[in-house]
Amino acid sequence: MEKKKTYRFPFLLLIFLLALCFLLNLSLGSVSISLSDTLHVIFGGDLENSSLEYIIWNYRIPKACTALLVGSGLALSGLLMQTLFRNPLAGPFVLGISSGASLGAAILIMGASLVAGYATFSFANDIALAVASSIGSFLVLLAVLTVAMRIKDTMALLIIGLMFGSITAAIVSVLSYFSNAEELQQFIYWSFGSIGNLSWGQLVLLLSFVCIGTLLSVLSIKSLNGYLLGENYAKSLGINLKKSRYLIIIATGLLAGSITAFAGPIAFIGLAVPHLTRQIFDTTDHKILVPAVLIYGGIILLLCDAVAQLPGSVNVLPINAITSILGAPVVIWLLLRKRKMVF
């Protein structure tokens, strides 16, 4: 039996790195603010320049918290999908939930002008995009759950999820074909992903979804451990496969759907982080892996956002590009190093 206390040092190290990356993220930006001034403001102090306080409280802290939530949520949902389907290449978006969110955003930005005959670009603000994306991801999640009630084969569910993603992507392509340049530019900008546009109210809402998804994941730990050795073994442990599968899918939907709705599609975090975590924690026990990927995911996205800030420059790179550039080599390296990915 694995003992959790064996991993005390790696957990302490990850928590220290998380705090360090959070402070690093707060200290970077187009406006130069020292870390000491940032900490002074956080602990209730005042600065002579009130505009710096505004930047810290209304931009940098919400952005760093968003990076933490998005990285943790995507990493956890990726772990859930890889375990459920026992597939190392499964990620949080294999069920088409991200594509559903993209479809909702595409309909808001590009679709209404085809139906009503007028452009909707001016109405596509951040709140409207979040609502439309949430509706799209929820509808796809509802469709996946409906299908899950009718089939027992988990791999068939994976294929059906990929087909849902293909259908929604095809509809987005059709909408893009008939849209004008301004609408296309708005949709492409959304597809880059962004963690710097959330208000405190939106951040609290995102936190609520991530917390619920995490709680459902914690409740599924026994089922996740059982799935590793196959569905027959899980049945022998007294696990209700249908109920546990619903719970895992709902948790993934809440995590991936809400994150995509508020931050846009962000690639590779959900795919790469669970594998990176297994390199540090040589275990398959989800009592250890679940909290570990939550911390590790937050660290990785905070670092990616720090790179995207282009320290010393006013420009900010798309976060989705940074995660892909860093994530793809990691997966390639793991495949070359391990020859195969072991669960």
Image: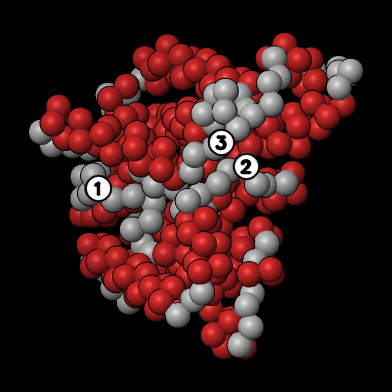
Q: Position of residue 183 (x, y in %)?
A: 54, 69
Q: Mark 2 or mark 3: which comes first in sequence?
A: 2
Mark 2 surroundings: few (<14), some (14-19) or many (≥20) residues within 10 A: some
Numbered label attached to residue 166: none
Q: Position of residue 2 (x, y in %)?
A: 31, 23
- Residue at the disc numbered 3: 315
Camera-side mark, 2 or 1: 2
Please name the amino acid that badge 3 sits on.
Asn
Camera-side mark, 1 or 3: 3
Question: Tag 3's secondary structure?
Answer: loop
Instruction: Tell me: residue 311, above or below residue 108.
Output: above
Q: Is residue 29 visible?
A: yes
| Nearest the eye: 268 or 212 | 268
Instruction: Tell me: residue 139, above or below residue 218.
Output: below
How far apart are the alpha carbons under marks 2 and 3?
A: 13 Å
Furthest residue toward front: 181
- Residue at the disc numbered 2: 196
Res. 309 image quadrant: top right
Q: Mark 2 near mark 3, Cβ–Cβ under 8 Å?
A: no
| Nearest the eye: 79 or 1 | 79
Please name the amino acid that badge 1 sits on.
Leu
Q: Residue visible at 49% across and 39% down?
A: 317
| Nearest the eye: 280 or 175 | 175
Res. 330 image quadrant: top left
Task: Give the color scheme: rainbow, by chain, secondary structure or one colour.
Answer: secondary structure
**In the displayed structure image, the side of residue 46 where residue 200 appears, left or right:** left
